[in-house]
Amino acid sequence: MYARLLILIYAIASYVIFLASFLYAFGFLSNTVVPKSIDIGERVGLGEAIAVNLLLLGAFAIPHSVMARPFFKRGWARFLPVACQRSTYVLVSSLLLVLLFWQWRPIPAPVWKVEGFASWVLTGIYWLGWLLAVASTYMIDHLDLFGLRQAFLALRGTKASRTEFRMPLLYKIVRHPLMLGFLLIFWATPEMSIGHLLFATMSTLYILIALQFEERDLIADFGATYQQYRQRVPMLLPRISRGGRS
């Protein structure tokens, strides 16, 4: 019983750390509220800034993707309880994100700056991206996504059942609304700096590559059901018209 309670405490602590990093990310990307952001902080030479920032992005992206793969899950299942696996994934990803915020080297030279109505539109899209990202987690299973459901089930002494394939709300429009939300967050800014552009470009490339691996895993899990879903629903960009389709 004590081990199960520790698993729950661990899951809650991991989730709290995730929430802190998630909230900081809002200020980090918008250059508001937080003391150190994507364009605010100690400046270094351009070459050093690009090298350090690329290392930080890679240090987040590679573990974040590798830890989500089935072969990795099977490997660490030998020494880590299943109920802890998702929480550990959330914790490691959150800490790597904190490291990125802490060590990021701003490159504030402007790429574009818009004012007036265009500025309000881009800011609105930025907010829409956050709303889309948060809402999409609740449309599937927020507690399961962040490891809390697994910990609660472990406390009760029951195992998590196999996830069923569902297409709630936004998932009928695009297959990955969470990632679409992040893309809007990365790119919708009235003031784009070189540092922000580097972050947005590399993060977008990572998302596009990582989704290929994720889709392969989903096909392995759900087979023809997911294959048919892929044919009907676009990955990231909603279809404007269904003209020409039978």
Image (cartoon, rainbow, N blue to C red):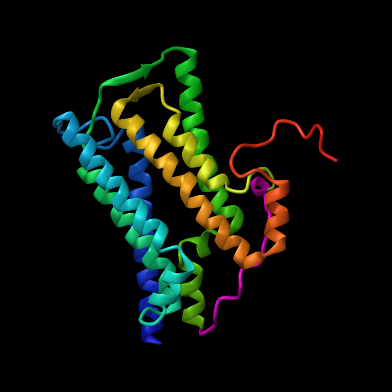
Q: Can you say which quadrant of the picture contains the C terminus?
A: top right
Q: Position of residue 17 (x, y in %)?
A: 33, 57
The percent position of residue 242, horizontal first and vertical second, equals: 78, 35
Q: Quadrant of residue 164?
A: bottom right
Percent position of residue 29, x then y = 35, 35
Asked if the stretch drawn in magenta spans residue 163, the answer is: yes
Q: Is residue 42 above or below residue 76?
A: above
Q: Residue 34 is drawn in which quadrant?
A: top left
Closer to the camera, 82 or 194? 194
In this rendering, position of residue 150 left or right of residue 23: right
| Image position of 34 (left or right of 30) | left
Image height of 84 relative to 121, above or below: below
Residue at horizontal 44 percent and vertical 31 percent from the top: 187
> Residue sitting at 45 percent across and 12 percent down?
116
Point out residue 206 in the picture as x, y percentages from the top left corner.
42, 46
Magenta span of residues: 157-171
Name the residue: 58% across, 41% down. 236
